[in-house]
Amino acid sequence: MTVNLLEFDSEGLASFCEGLGEKRFRATQLFRWIHQRGATGFDEMSDLAKSLRDKLSGVAEIKALPVISEQVASDGTIKWLFDVGGGDAVETVYIPEVDRGTLCISSQAGCAVGCRFCSTGHQGFSRNLSTAEIVAQLWYAEHELRRRAAPVGGAADGTRVISNVVMMGMGEPLQNYGALVPALRVMLDDHAYGLSRRRVTVSTSGVVPMIDRLRDDCPVALAVSLHAPNDALRSDLVPLNRKYPIDELLQACTRYLEKAPRDFITFEYCMLDGVNDTAEHARELIALVQPAGREGVSCKLNLIPFNPFPESGLKRSAPDRVQAFAHRLQEAGIVTTVRKTRGDDIAAACGQLAGEVQDRTRVETRRVRAPIRSQPAAPALQGPRV
Ligand code: SF4
């Protein structure tokens, strides 16, 4: 069986080369060919000894994920659906802006957390992606977009297209920690994509022990899906909160900031009509991040207009309500932005990624369709699988 070289960070590739009886430095050349030049075969790696190329062809490959479909939105956002085998597919979204190109990457086929406002969560969980499957999304997008930017008949000039990566696609990245960290290292490696730690963001629903591990192993920018200012409401919207309540989560955020590349945590807050968007919720949120008598968490609030899907039973907050909520936070001195919705005509906006995933956790049969309340509610969902 051949090994997919997209599975390795530079250390892993050096060990692999050593295992073939080669010098470790050969891995750097190989790494550059794969990630900086987008090579798909060993024959084109002209500065590698023929003997090594022959050896590699027998035992290794550079295997992309098959593309099932590509959709381009009117605003230039591109969504790819990749086949990850076994009847599962995951989605990756490229968001072009004037000063940056952001790729939103999936970490799992489906998701076990089951957030009520998230289309992926409604599908249930199928499996973790491997490091190769996570990296393959970036590898494909970067080199495909470079090829498209090249002059007709000419070669791509190597100018980087993707400047930012957000682990905000399908899945909870910190529930696939073992595959995530080597993938992050590939993104950051100067011999691969060379992205700065500030431009790689892991978004989590709050897996507290893994936030601590990420801080020590590979601190990148952190976004936390908060979505509610108290435990009762958050446990209803983000079931993981029952295991790691808000106070524990905020303490983990404070610890993370000791090593984070940015001096703030981004809190994501999906605006749900009548559920978490009132003046009282804003007051609670302010008190949460700026507690009286002690230091709060250095943070930015990112308000996300909800992208409705039929099964959620939830509605998007009206724009004036979102603005009023943002205004209250800003008046309290909290840096607050309202996320621009991108790619919603191709269902590529936040929380809309559905892919095609076999629901092996039977989430729909586990789900109890209780109405969402902002007061303590009976558990509406099974706890997450962490
Ligand atoms: S919001 Fe994230 S953690 Fe929650 S169900 Fe969706 S993919 Fe999973």
Image: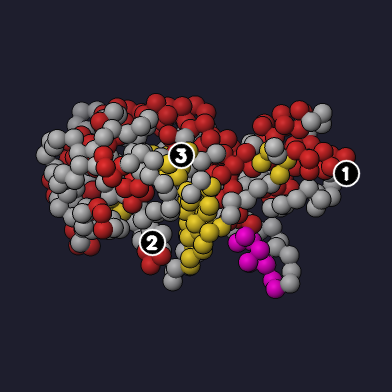
Look at 19% across and 32% down and name the residue there. 292
Q: Which mark is residue 127?
A: 3
Q: Secondary structure at mark 3?
A: strand
Look at 11% across and 39% down and name the residue there. 375
Quarter that holds the N terminus: top right
Q: Nearer the viewer, mark 1 or mark 3?
A: 3
Q: Earlier in the sequence, mark 2 or mark 3?
A: 3
The crowding category of the residue bearing disc 3, from other C-alpha atoms within 10 Å (few below 14, some 14 to 19, many at least 20), is some
Contact between marks 2 and 3 (CB within 8 A): the answer is: no
Picture quadrant where residue 3 is located:
top right
Residue 146 x, y percent position in the rendering: 64, 61
Q: Amino acid at mark 2?
A: Ala
Per the image, the residue denoted by label 2 is 347
Residue 334 x, y percent position in the rendering: 28, 45
Per the image, the residue denoted by label 1 is 50
Q: Nearer the viewer, mark 2 or mark 3?
A: 3
Give me the C-alpha separation between circle 2 and circle 1.
Answer: 47 Å
The stretch in magenta equals: 144-152
Instruction: Kindly give the residue lying farthest to the right in the view shown.
Output: 50
Asked if residue 379 lies left or right of residue 24, the reply is left
